[in-house]
Image (cartoon, rainbow, N blue to C red):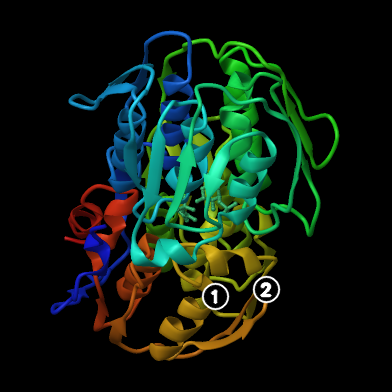
Amino acid sequence: MTDPARAVVEDPWPAPRARGPVEATVTLPGSKSLTNRALVLAAVADGPSVVRRALRSRDTTLMAAALTALGASVDTSGEDWRVTPGDLAGDAAVDCGLAGTVMRFVPPVAGLSSGTIAFDGDPHMRQRPVGEVLGALRALGIDVTGEALPFTVRGTGSVPGGTVVVDASASSQFISALLLAGARYDRGVDVRHDGKPVPSLPHIDMTVAMLREHGVEVDDADANRWAVAPGPVRAVDHLIEPDLSNAAPFLALAAVSGGTLTVRDWPRHTTQAGDALRGILAAMGCAVDLGDAGLTVTGPDRLQGVDLDLHDVGELAPAVAALCALADGPSHLRGIAHIRGHETDRLAALATELGRLGADVTEHPDGLELRPAALHGGVFRTYADHRMAHAGVVVGAAVDGVLVEDVATTAKTFPDFAGAWAALLG
Ligand SMILES: O=C(O)C1=C[C@@H](OP(=O)(O)O)[C@@H](O)[C@H](O)C1
Ligand SMILES: C=C(OP(=O)(O)O)C(=O)O
């Protein structure tokens, strides 16, 4: 399959430097996690629906294409995407790209089709974990061949369902995947986790909340158990919130420049894990205010180091690590062994690339320690990881001569990120 993010990069991007306090208000594109859940739920629903202000990025267009391959009709021509469920009787191929949500959320839907569905993706996607999901689908009565990409799902038009035990310590997406389509299985699904603690729990809460919006009965009263009752998934329209995790580099810009940045339309109540940025930035010394204009962050004179457990919000680690590398005091980021299985091994990548720019970093099995050091320019490699690019540009805003390799990899979740970033820094 094609892998645009891995193209050889001749010209790394000179990350623009903040020459003074950045003062700006930004409107961010929609949430990847909300958009891709809304698309899956729409495809298994009992009628047509609309995903308003859908994020248009590589991960979400791959999801739309995957669901189309499975027989749904997804009209992505406007800002609001119209989804009409449909039955698939033939064979199909699904390109997962580097999208965890496509690789994990679509196979449980493929089990409901009546065809042979072949899954593959970018070269690195073959390394990312999915075997627990595939094993669970087999236990629920689906014919699945393979333990990782490439793998094949043979649907028979219905899935028995039932109780299944998985070890979701590598990714919360294993649980979300089994819940999203579970109501359409004959006996529903009763998913139990057995293993080290599940990371990114807010993302499972997001899945449960959205299922309930669709009229699906979910029992999550006990820790490490989620039961979805069999029944129809009601068609409902969704309005997608801005992507709060992708707000991280923008808010970080206020933090490192001593400026003030407002992200418009920041929800007062949300299931997005990225909302944790408010507490994280406050702990680093920023002034944080959630008001009618949105979320406003003002950077301090001196950025403080932090000791944080990011187990629930691992996807924020790259931008937070970049801030810690620029802080005045030592930092320890813990609880994030699972991010070694993200778009790249993020702990190794951050230790290597921040270290290359002069940061004093120690890599631990489950985190990073960073101590104050004088950073300098150089090439910051991104390993086809959008959030590595976010880390690189944050350092580049504060340090002369940082060149970010393959900044276009940000297209995974953010259209024209480099353009939006450059516009802020003039
Ligand atoms: O369900 C989701 O939308 C996500 C869950 C999390 O995955 P992990 O549990 O693998 O960290 C998160 O990091 C990812 O960016 C999006
Ligand atoms: C881990 C991430 O993505 P994915 O949905 O591909 O797992 C991420 O966006 O940080």
User: Mark 1 to mark 2: distance in Å?
Assistant: 8 Å
The residue positioned 40% from the left and 67% from the top of the image is: 124
Percent position (x, y) of residue 134?
59, 47
What residue is pinned by disc 1?
347
Q: Amino acid at mark 2?
A: Asp
138 in relation to 212, above or below? below
**Which is more toward the observer, 23 or 311?**
311
Hey, which quadrant is residue 125 in on the image?
Answer: bottom left
Task: Give whichever of discs 1 and 2 has the lower sequence position.
Answer: 1
Hey, which quadrant is residue 136 in on the image?
Answer: top right
Percent position (x, y) of residue 59?
35, 46
297 in relation to 223, above or below? below
For label 1, the SS is helix
What residue is pinned by disc 2?
366
**Which is more toward the observer, 165 or 179?**
165
Image quadrant occupied by the N terminus = bottom left
For label 2, the SS is loop
Percent position (x, y) of residue 9?
18, 76
The residue positioned 50% from the left and 22% from the top of the image is: 157
Percent position (x, y) of residue 131?
59, 55
Image quadrant occupied by the C terminus = bottom left
Query: How would you rate the neighbour count of disc 1 (Cα within 10 Å): few for under 14, some for 14-19, many for 20 or more?
Result: many
Q: Is residue 173 left or right of residue 366?
A: left
* Extreme residue toward the right, this view: 222
Asked if one can make out residue 241 in the rendered structure from this viewpoint, the answer is yes
